[in-house]
Image (cartoon, grey):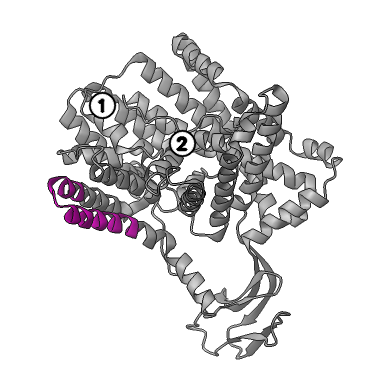
Amino acid sequence: MDFLYRLKELFVYDASSPMLFSSGTFVLIFSVFIIFYGLLHKNKTFISLYVIAFSVFFYYKSSGWYLAILVFTAISDYAFALAIAKTRKKYLRKIWLTLSLGTSLGLLAYFKYTNFFLENITAFLQGGYEPLDIFLPIGISFYTFQSVSYVLDVYWGKLKPTRKFLDYAFFLSFFPQLVAGPIVKAHFFLPQLEKKINITREMVWGGMWLIMIGLFKKAVIADYISQYNDMLFAAPENYSGFENLMGVLGYTLQIYCDFSGYSDMAIGLGKVMGFDLGINFRFPYQALNITDFWRRWHISLSSWLRDYVYIPLGGNKKGKTRMYINLATTMLVGGLWHGANWKFVFWGAMHGTGLAMHKAFKKISDKINNNFFVRFVSWSFTFIFVVFLWIFFRAADTPTTAYTERIPVQNEQSFQYRVTQSDTSANKIATIELYQSGKFIKKYSEEVQNSDGRKIIFDLTEKEGFHEIKVITIKKGFDVAVSIVRKIAFDMDLSFAIHFWEARKAWVLLIIIGFLMHSISEKWNQRLIEAYIRSHYTIKVLMFVILLQLVVQFKLEDVHPFIYFQF
């Protein structure tokens, strides 16, 4: 019975535990999957059905019945692309394109941006706002952009639409890159499906290397160092300037190891199966300027934005002023893609400004001698700029319970809370009424914007025979980021370094290891991969066993979702 119960759990979606590459469940299931894949991969039709079925199962285990949105997107955009290709009349082609983009991007906008728009509209109208209970399906930003790239490529004549729905379903649902990228363009991936799957020794062991490196980055470095980073960003005012700086550097490494670790595993899984998913990261913190950074960071997204936003807007073909506007617009889209929040708009706008400034001064900078000192200064400025903006990217609204009172259910009382705003003449009052009957009570909360930028929530809930009244202050993410910057700028005391090392030796060592791994040149990285491929099986097994021991040693209670699942 216990076996049957565990088997049932294996095939049922659990919202509290979505399937991840770094989980033991996935390793077990994939091990069985890849055995049959290796035996049957030469039968193209069968293997397509097999991989699509596994991808559907994988996505169901990640997002439940939101799988229906993926299926709908695949069917609708496949049909729209065929309609565009068959239609000769320009206005009809535009109609089909508009319907396709409206459907795909409309679904993305609903799930990702509805509450953001409602919150800002109601704030503008000075009305009350209660967010809708909308769940963001995992990976919707990634597979929507993939589907949009296919339809646009067909519309522009860059790609002939595939006549086989199985090929398109395979492309859109391919599980290694389905939920967190890379964003694989149709014109890059679909041609691979027209050829026989050829799995070479170099692909298998090169893929295994990427899987192991990705697992180490994610499950050992990113998950472990995230503990301190999360504490720091939750209450930066409780830490010194040095500790704030360490938390910021920690998050800088964490987001890289988490996201590039996932990309490494996804690309590695693709290689093991005989498919090329491209490159998504090329040691981005080695960049010497912000343009170089975006050629190295999340390459699949930056190239997508270039091909489907920047160039269609006119790129650099319509004068300098228009080029700067196009850059700003493209990066604003990139910022909003990451999340429905003004902090992402700010992050995108600042990166757009950085790109525009680099373009503006490129002729001057190209004339400067490219010696070590110049490269070091250029790298330092770029790294500090990127790290500074990660603070605003990471900082989130932080709630703090300022006051709690528990009242027995049988009492009938009325309470008033007054919040004074120095910038207005009127006070806003939230009244919470308690009723004598304890069988049912309506939850009532009102948000009041305080003069210091904090949001006050008056919350009433029934708990263990009591009415619990909480007055919660929520410090906005932008203000949290400003607090961190101020701490680092005005409260820096390097004497904390000794105490920090004594208290967090493992954290510091992982930070050092992470940045040393990142500092290797691309040439030496390729040599390491080639050496691993040529190495004896005993060395490969030994490396894998050591990795598993490290994962177990640093494993947290719960498997941390990938950072980019939220996007």
Of circles 2 and 1, which is in front? 2
Q: Is residue 257 magenta?
A: no
Residue 281, label in figure: none
Mark 2–mark 1 Cα distance, whole angstroms, equals 32 Å
> Residue 557, relative to residue 279: is it above or below?
below
- Identify the residue shown where x is 36% and y is 42%: 178
Query: Percent x, y for residue 409?
Result: 58, 83
Helix, strand or loop at disc 2?
Answer: helix
| Residue located at (63% from left, 34% from top) | 364
Mark 1 residue crowding within 10 angstroms, few (<14) / some (14–19) / many (20+): few
Q: Is 410 left, or right, of 440 in this rendering?
A: right
Residue 103's x, y, as percent? 28, 58
Q: Is residue 200 above or below residue 167?
A: above
Q: Which residue is drawn at the image coordinates 62% and 54% (left, top)?
A: 395
Q: Residue at x 66, y 40 (%)?
A: 250
Considering every residue shown, the one lying at the far front of the view is 319
Residue kind at label 1, given as amino acid type: Phe
Say which residue label 2 marks.
Answer: 299
Q: Is residue 2 above or below residue 486?
A: above
Secondary structure predominantly adopted by residues drawn in magenta: helix
Q: On the image, numbered disc 1 is attached to which residue?
A: 36
Q: Write the start and end of the magenta stretch as one range.
A: 80-107
Question: Is 97 or 200 nearer to us in this picture?
Answer: 97
Q: Nearer the viewer, residue 50 or 359?
A: 359
Residue 91 is covered by the magenta coloring: yes
Q: Position of residue 119 (x, y in %)?
A: 50, 70
Q: Is residue 502 visible?
A: yes
Does the image show residue 20?
A: no
**Amino acid type, residue under disc 2 in the picture:** Ile
Q: Is residue 190 left or right of residue 109?
A: left
Q: Secondary structure at mark 1?
A: helix
Q: Residues within 10 Å of mark 2 (few under 14, many from 20)?
A: many
